[in-house]
Image: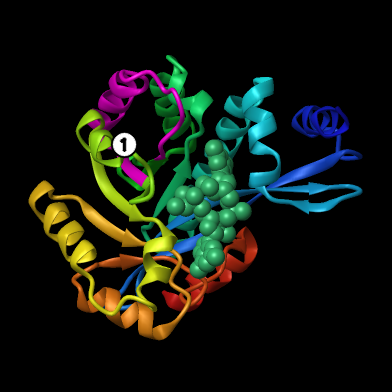
Amino acid sequence: QALLTDLRRTLDGDVTAGTFEVYYQPLVELGTGLITGCEALMRWRHTERGMVRPDDFFGLAETSGLAGELDRWVLGEALAQVAAWEQEGIGSIYVSVNLGRTSMLDPRLAEATLQSLEHAGVKPTQLHLEITEHDELPPEAGALTLALLTEAGVRVSLDDFGIGYTSLDYLHRYPVRQLKLDRSITSNLQTDPSSPLLEGIVAMARSLKVDVVAEGIETEPQRERLAGLGIAYGQGYHLCRPQPAELMTDLLRQAG
Ligand code: G
Ligand code: G
Ligand code: MN
Ligand code: NA
């Protein structure tokens, strides 16, 4: 398949096939507007097709065995970026990196991640790893790895919370420190003025001592409602779109 060949070539550094980039989207404290972290989102600039989004190549990467390498590349990039921001003194923020299915199953993930942190000179507390529900993931997959990483100070974030079947199960399987409410929950706010579900999630998160991030905030009324419900953090186009690293750096300079 042509796309797979190009993916491989890009990974091997063949720029005639394409290049990978990391975009950054801030995680914002809803009460103050302060940027507390940034999510690293992979982009593939394909020579002929232009910008290809992860949804259009990550599936292929997972089935062809390239996904682990992609995740590791993003991790290295993101940690180097955080180290550069730290060095410039423009804020002590964390970076949130998505883990795919392959990475969750990788027995060397803990070791490799700690090595990357050390190599970049970044404190483990400045790294969040976003995990999400995957089909047929063995119940113990990643549990030991994530426990080891948590022990070292890395934080685990449960992505796409509220749409899967096993979200609640994941909460006790893994040492989760942060819940990211799926953006469908945020968009339902518009049509559903009462929010017993959200109130319940906030109460649960409080008793579990995990932070809550609302994803997909696209309007000011949504931001206000979510903040009013006691949700501390948010992410979404209304707060800030995913940005190339240089633009993110400018934003952080202005904010600081
Ligand atoms: O950035 P965008 O909204 O197009 O991302 C689409 C999906 O791709 C999201 O579910 C996101 O979590 C995922 N994604 C983005 N970057 C990475 C990455 O580096 N690794 C993995 N595994 N998934 C990613
Ligand atoms: O699955 P995950 O939560 O990692 O997905 C992140 C994806 O959500 C990224 O592709 C990002 O581009 C997208 N995204 C971020 N903010 C918004 C938003 O406000 N609205 C929509 N529709 N997508 C968003
Ligand atoms: Mn995510
Ligand atoms: Na999500």
Q: Magenta stretch: give its range.
A: 131-158
Task: Left or right? Give the position of 173 relative to 9.
Answer: left
Residue toward you, 90 or 189: 189
Q: Where residue 133 sits: x, y (%)?
A: 41, 36
Residue 37 appears in the figure? yes
Give the residue drawn at x 36%, y 58%: 92
Give the residue drawn at x 83%, y 42%: 18
Task: Left or right? Give the position of 205 relative to 8.
Answer: left
Query: Total number of numbered labels?
Result: 1
Residue 24 appears in the figure? no
Locate the C terminus by quadrant: bottom left
Colouring mode (rainbow / by chain / secondary structure / one colour): rainbow
* Location of mark 1 (residue): 166
Relative to 70, say whether 52 is above or below.
below
Q: Where residue 87 sits: x, y (%)?
A: 46, 54
**Residue type highlighted by circle 1:** Thr
Q: Quadrant of residue 57?
A: top right
Q: Where residue 109 sits: x, y (%)?
A: 44, 22
Q: Quadrant of residue 10?
A: top right
Does the magenta segment cover residue 136?
yes
Relative to 57, say whether 33 is above or below.
below
Task: Left or right? Give the position of 21 relative to 159.
Answer: right
Q: Where residue 197 sits: x, y (%)?
A: 22, 62
